[in-house]
Amino acid sequence: EKAGYKHFMLKEINEQPRAIRDTTLGRVSLDTGKVFLEAMQLTDDDLRNASQITIAACGTSWHAGLAGKFMIERLARLPVEVDYASEYRYRDPIADPRAIGLLITQSGETADTLAAQAELIAKGSKTLAICNVVGAAITRKAQGTLTTNAGPEIGVASTKAFTAQLTALFVLALHLAQVRGTISDEESLHLVTELSKLPGKLASLLNINSPDAPGSSEGVAAPTRLSQNAGHNKNVSFRPEAQSDLSGLTQNVSSRPERSGVEGPPHFATDRRSTTRQPLSAQCEELARLFHTSDDFLFLGRGIHYPIALEGALKLKEISYIHAEGYPAGEMKHGPNALIDESLPVVCIATKDPNDPSSVLKYEKTLSNIQEVTARSGRVIAIAIEGDTEISQLVEQTIYIPQAPELLLPILEVVPLQLLAYHIAVRRGCDVDQPRNLAKSVTVE
Ligand code: F6R
């Protein structure tokens, strides 16, 4: 049932290449860059004339919504507000018939999210759902549903459903942009091509030969020598990702192939100095060994990476019971810097898309924030882009992920955070798939 994995969570983390592929497949054309969404009761005119999008969701799905705001506002130039579904109806929200409500939910049965949908409908808004369960309650009242094809998620901590939600939000943002005329054909084609490369990049990051194969870095008896270099400057890297994508699969938007086309050798993190090749999972296991006794963790990110910092903190909290907070990197100096000392691990998402000036600027600001943490003896674990040697000079630990456009980076950068939480929880002897006090589907308000 767990396909040889020790826990459902680990199996589901490793299923992400397939989940992303299946959420993309049939919805994009690699020839034209056009997005095709399933039939819905919302017309293109409804989308064109929309005044705003109101996202309501809970927990991990809310984090996906926060990232979706960046995608939709940037590509479709449409204002987006994101609410906790559990709060939405208690603030007499302003919604109108031109506003579109977007409910994001893995189960489609979360009571708070259903209540937010009812409030939106009562105010005259039309609603769309992003949901992983076909026919779930939320989809029955929605004017359209974008199904995340992540497959059943058994582990209580959401992993593959989250990255599938991010994928669905990206596809929706592209569709809105195309309908509203805010994106060029060339940019559309570029982004769709990049989206199609994600399953291969994820497989490479997870050290899986094919998204269809259950194989993972687990069980790979790779030497795990994350050597400590006077406490600092660890250089680890990935070989360039497999040049694999969905080509040939998405050309014909209606056919579903048997295989993904993701091929190529497994890819490992590499310690350049020792030439020890290290899979991501082994690297996270080593970080877990170093940090599993910490009482607190901080996760920092800027822009679209901030919701991923929140998600990294939530994963750690719920399965390892370690207190963790996600914070916008730039807010540290407004208070939380006071928390930093030599015992505090600070996970900083410091990725960048070198082709995107706003992303580079954000990265540079994040570097300054990291320096503020290291100056106060905080122990920084950075998530960075493959080949970034600047960052590894600054911090104690670096985990590299493959390059991608800014709006797609969250799908890659959350993976090491999931594995870090997983390995810390395992080390602490926690019940990873069934954390205390939590249920998979929360059907009470
Ligand atoms: C965290 C987690 C929860 C859910 C939340 C919403 O790992 O799984 O935070 O994301 O309860 O659930 P859905 O998406 O089913 O509405």
Image (cartoon, rainbow, N blue to C red):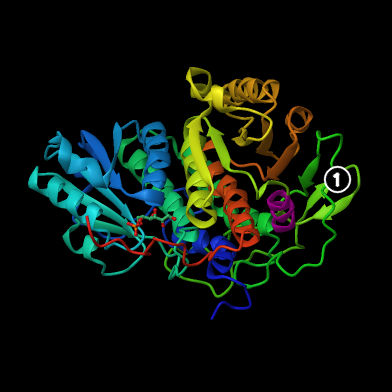
The percent coordinates of residue 24 (x first, y second) are 46, 58
Foreground pick, 117 / 250? 117
The percent coordinates of residue 149 (x first, y second) are 42, 65
Q: Residue at x 47, y 49 (%)?
A: 32
Dot 1: element: loop
Quadrant observed for ligand 1 in the rendered image: bottom left
Q: Residue at x 84, y 41 (%)?
A: 228
Q: Residue at x 65, y 42 (%)?
A: 403
Q: How many numbered tags mark residues here?
A: 1
> Is 432 above or below relative to 242?
below
Foreground pick, 366 / 40? 366
The percent coordinates of residue 112 (x first, y second) are 23, 53
> Is 389 above or below relative to 422?
above
Taking the image as shown, residue 245 lies to the left or right of residue 29, namely right
Residue 285: in magenta span: yes
Foreground pick, 383 / 205? 383
Taking the image as shown, residue 65 lies to the left or right of residue 95, namely right
Q: Which residues are magenta?
A: 281-289
According to the picture, the residue beneath numbered tag 1 turns out to be 227
Taking the image as shown, residue 188 lies to the left or right of residue 181, namely right
Label 1 crowd (10 A; few <14 / some 14-19 / many >=20): some
Label 1 CB-ligand 1 distance < 8 A? no
The percent coordinates of residue 295 (x first, y second) are 58, 43
Residue at the outermost right position: 274
Q: Quadrant of the C terminus?
A: bottom left
Residue 223: in magenta span: no
Majority secondary structure of the magenta segment?
helix
Q: Amino acid type of disc 1?
A: Ser
Q: Determine the image quadrant of residue 259.
A: bottom right
Taking the image as shown, residue 106 lies to the left or right of residue 304, namely left
- State whether residue 186 appears in this view: no
